[in-house]
Image (tube, coloured by chain):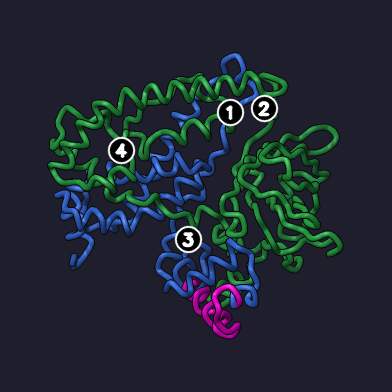
Chain colours: A blue, B green
Amino acid sequence: MWPDDADLVAGFAAGDDLAVKAIYERFARPILTVGMSALGRRDLADEVVQTTMLKAWRAASTFDRSRDLAPWIYAIARRVAIDIHRREARAAVPTEIGDDLTVEPLSFSRTWEAWEVRSAVEKLPADERDVVRLAHLGGLTHREIAEQLGVPIGTVKSRSARAHRRLASLLGHLVGVNK
Amino acid sequence: MNEDELADRLETGGYRLGAEAAARRPGDELADLLADAATWAEPEPGGADALLAAIGAERGEDAGLWPARADDPTPLPDAAYGGPRSVDRTLRSVPFGGNGVSAAAAQRSGHGPAAHAARSRRFRWQWPAAAVAAALVLVVGVAALLIAPGGDDSHPPGQAFSIAGTPMAPGASAVATVDAQPAGVAIVLDVHGLPPADPGTYYQAWVENGTGRVTVGTFHMRGGDGWIYLWSGVDADRYPMLRVTLEHEGDGDGASNEVVLAGAISS
């Protein structure tokens, strides 16, 4: 529907329903990952998603359409997460019981990697993504994944190998791999 | 390192329970992220509709009636921040986006002009009601703090970290508070939603790094949610990952691969 990101952003800036939904579908997951990585709380991460999207919409009319869309939205998300972290830190200023309180540590240094990993995962075919999720998040063996998905173990192995080759290709720039 | 080597490194993941001892190498940090629950979290259903509703409101369809801008969420009073336990519970009651727009409500109500008008009329009533509800939640939270054993001293000292439930226990979560003491590292796990271990089974907590792991205690959760007191004889900086596994009596000393909680305990 949108030949390129420039047209998509134009529709987004105009508040076109389909463009807004397309932007949300494409970026809500990486933004949520950044929010959770930076703030460690689901409720705050949800707030990062919504606020980032609104800020992006407000700024979309001034977006330089020669630039890449993803880093622009990532920058907004990171800024929003920092603002929310500061707000929460202010709310945690010690009162009578404050010395016992802690705010979860903030790690913004790796949020770009978190964004990139999430974006790469979203580019995998669904069957390969399932295998990667079960292996890494679930800690399952290939045999256990095969049982859970009801497919032969050889299928799991080949999907896993394909998926990790794709991920290596998509993420290699983060660790300086040689092509 | 080339792409094939990175793919292999990602697939074997040098950081998993049961992995052979291996030094940390480039790419392992990406494998860590693949094992992080944040990488797999799904946005709240109806989020796109909530966004459309908020955009519609800002474009003037509900001029003057929208309760607040989404980037200017009304902060809770300072007193509402009672540490990770009460904050989590209190803020979960704040509507999606912090602007009074509930994703579920937006999904139900649509986002056309008529729906906006109806929603705005509802907000006139919902906003004071939400304030009353927030005040009640605040009172309950403060009361819970006051009646908790130990009163103000009941929250463990240390640095807090979120520990996520895995697909084996998707409803589980924990906050790990880590405090280096003269005798070792005190780790208090504030666990929620982890089912009681069946008879003959128990939970075991481990700290680990790329080269090994050390057990820091066992528990069963048969008394419901609560705090688990663990002790580690190794520094969290050198063993920065915490995992909880489900173990079966008689299965030996090693860790099973039935991981129910996982997360970092060092920044």
- Residue B217 pos. (x, y %): 80, 47
**SS label for mark 3:** helix
Q: For marks 1 and 3, give the CA distance.
A: 31 Å
Q: Mark 4 points at which residue?
A: B101
Query: Mark 1, mark 3: which one is toward the viewer?
Result: 1
What's the chain of the residue with tag 4? B
Inspect the image, locate mark 4, and give the three-letter code of the amino acid beneath it: Val
Q: Do marks 4 and 1 share a subunit?
A: yes
Q: For marks 2 and 4, give the CA distance.
A: 33 Å
What's the chain of the residue with tag 3? A
Inspect the image, locate mark 2, and give the three-letter code of the amino acid beneath it: His
Q: Do marks 1 and 2 share a subunit?
A: yes
The residue closer to the viewer here, A88 or B252, is B252
As drawn, B95 above or below B218: above
**SS label for mark 2:** loop
**SS label for mark 4:** loop
Inspect the image, locate mark 3, and give the three-letter code of the amino acid beneath it: Val
Q: For marks 4 and 1, give the CA distance.
A: 26 Å
- Residue B66 pos. (x, y %): 22, 31
Q: Earlier in the sequence, mark 1 or mark 2?
A: 1
Q: Name the residue under label 3.
A: A117
The residue closer to the viewer here, A93 or B163, is B163
Q: Do marks 2 and 3 share a subunit?
A: no
Inspect the image, locate mark 1, and give the three-letter code of the amino acid beneath it: Gly
Q: Is residue A34 visible?
A: yes
Which residue ends up furthest to the top in the rendered image?
A: A96
Q: For marks 1 and 2, give the CA distance.
A: 8 Å
The residue closer to the viewer here, A28 or B194, is B194
Dividing the picture into quadrants, the one containing residue B154 is top right
Q: Name the residue under label 1.
A: B83
